Image (spheres, helix red, strand yellow):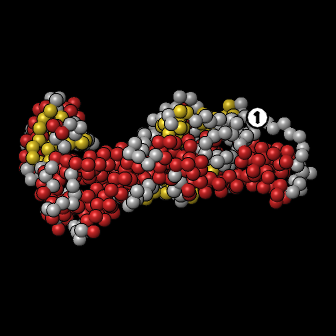
Amino acid sequence: MKQQIVQYIESAVRGASSKGFFEAVELPFIEVEVSRDKAHGDYASNIAMVLAASLKQKPREIAAILANEMQGHDDVLEKVEIAGPGFINFFIREKVWLGLLAKVDRLGEQFGGAGIGNGRRIQLEFVSANPTGPLHIGHARGAVIGDVLANILRASGYEVHKEYYINDAGNQMHNLGKSVYCRYLGILGEHIDFPDTCYQGKYILDIARDIVRSDGNRHHARPPDEVIREFTDRAAASILKGIQEDLGAFGVFFDAYFSERQLYEKGVVAELLGDLENRGFIYRDDGTLWFRTTDFGDEKDRVVVRQNGEPTYFAADIAYHKDKFERGFETLIDIWGADHHGYIPRMHAGIQAMGYAKDALRVILVQLVSLLRDAKPVAMSTRAGEFVTLREVIDEVGKDAARYHFMMRRSDSQLDFDLEVAKRQSMDNPVYYVQYAHARICSIFRLAGERGMSVPSFEDADVSLLNLPEELGLIKCIIRYPEVVEGAATALEPHRLTFYLNELAGIFHSYYNKFKVISDDGDLSRARLLLMKSIRTVLSNALGLLGVSAPEHM
């Protein structure tokens, strides 16, 4: 419906221009939003205010002209009103809303999808935690945001490739191997002062114990540097395997895992830096290599190779993103922790220096998660290795509750995750609230079957009987679902799904508590069963995009 109104506006602008009401103008992006107040109609647009500057006319005058041009759409538009400084409000005829239930019924599981992606290829990189320890709840939030966004983009017609970048090069990997080596020596009875720079978690001790069980003390007499290199690889492989298992339990699966180390082993980083230096984007100063990121709007130039010859993360990241483009991806989406905000300008500089458009890379920042138990903070200390892992959260609250709760806020807003709320089998638990709506509808269908009634198709129901304001409100909410999915895909805001589901479930539960679906009136029962069918379709489809189950019994 929103897209249809956009088309009406486009046609009205062209019509008014051809009739000389105002000069020909290049159409800007036409914004159409759902009206917050029912008194202001179903949809509203600020197009008149957007056009006012270029047309040098008052917004209300432009709005009046456009409203007049749209008079030929009386079959859809009950009326078009001008409000405030120049908003155009659109009132859709009730029969149009009722008729749109046919589309929901026809498309079923496909309802909500869109073709805006046109098969364009997107590479979506997320999680990408260092293989130096298990995933914690901060990683969990980024994982579900990335996974749900991939589902939304695919439903919108994009070809999406999900990738995990393994940061398996650099000093943190050496510290990993050193940590295991120290624990290994300690198990063998050697007194070791465990360095503060090493990883403290119990998982390090577990890895060391596994090595002792399989290899005994045969590494004790070997050169430490040689052993540390081997322990680094063994520990990284063990931790990555655990990460993959935890992500699998969370319902997150990647199309590929990409190793940072490969970039160095294949000489990709050195080759790229040499090319950028030859083209003047990199310069040397006292043995340090600097990237001229200020040429692209960064606040200062950035080091790519330190004075000691060690490349920075930035060097590998540029090479990695170049590899992404060379694999044919048109748009790159990275999901990072909010503390990486300052890293965005230099990455945009990097891809522009390589000849790609700045907006070919889009970055989503994910804010911190505060873990609570009955509204009281749960203490966590990454320094001591005492943090709450993703696996612990899944084991306590379950995959569905964990995924849904991590999606309850915008990614750039801090999230409070209350473990006790997530476990409750009550209506104050958002995921239970939504899943229970689906289960309630399934129970209605079972009752209908017991009474010899089948759930009708659109053609077998008299939708004109759905004339209560509450029913029309439900239908409008159902029909908005594809708009929600498209908006989430365009804005890269997957949290819009949970906001929408909470709204739809709320309207449904209110209706369920006030009205009987199945009654002695057969025609009305069939009409209301069709309405329930449409709600269940949307609930199931949206929960599917979230990676959350839609139970039939609760």
- Answer above or below: position of 338 versus 271: above
Residue 389: image x %, image y %?
61, 45
Please give the residue where the numbered disc 1 appears in the rendered image: 196
Q: Quadrant of the C terminus?
A: bottom left
Residue shown at the point (30%, 45%) measured from the top left: 506
Residue 329: image x %, image y %?
48, 55
Q: Disc 1 marks which amino acid?
A: Asp
Q: Would residue 490 be visible to someone looking at this image?
A: no
Residue 536 is left or right of residue 67, and the answer is right
Q: Would residue 76 be visible to someone looking at this image?
A: yes
Q: Foreground residue, 121 or 1?
A: 1
Q: Foreground residue, 394 or 382?
A: 394
Tell me the SS state at disc 1: loop
User: Residue furthest toward the bottom?
Assistant: 452
Q: Residues within 10 Å of mark 1 (few under 14, many from 20)?
A: few
Residue 152: image x %, image y %?
40, 53
- Answer above or below: position of 10 versus 457: above
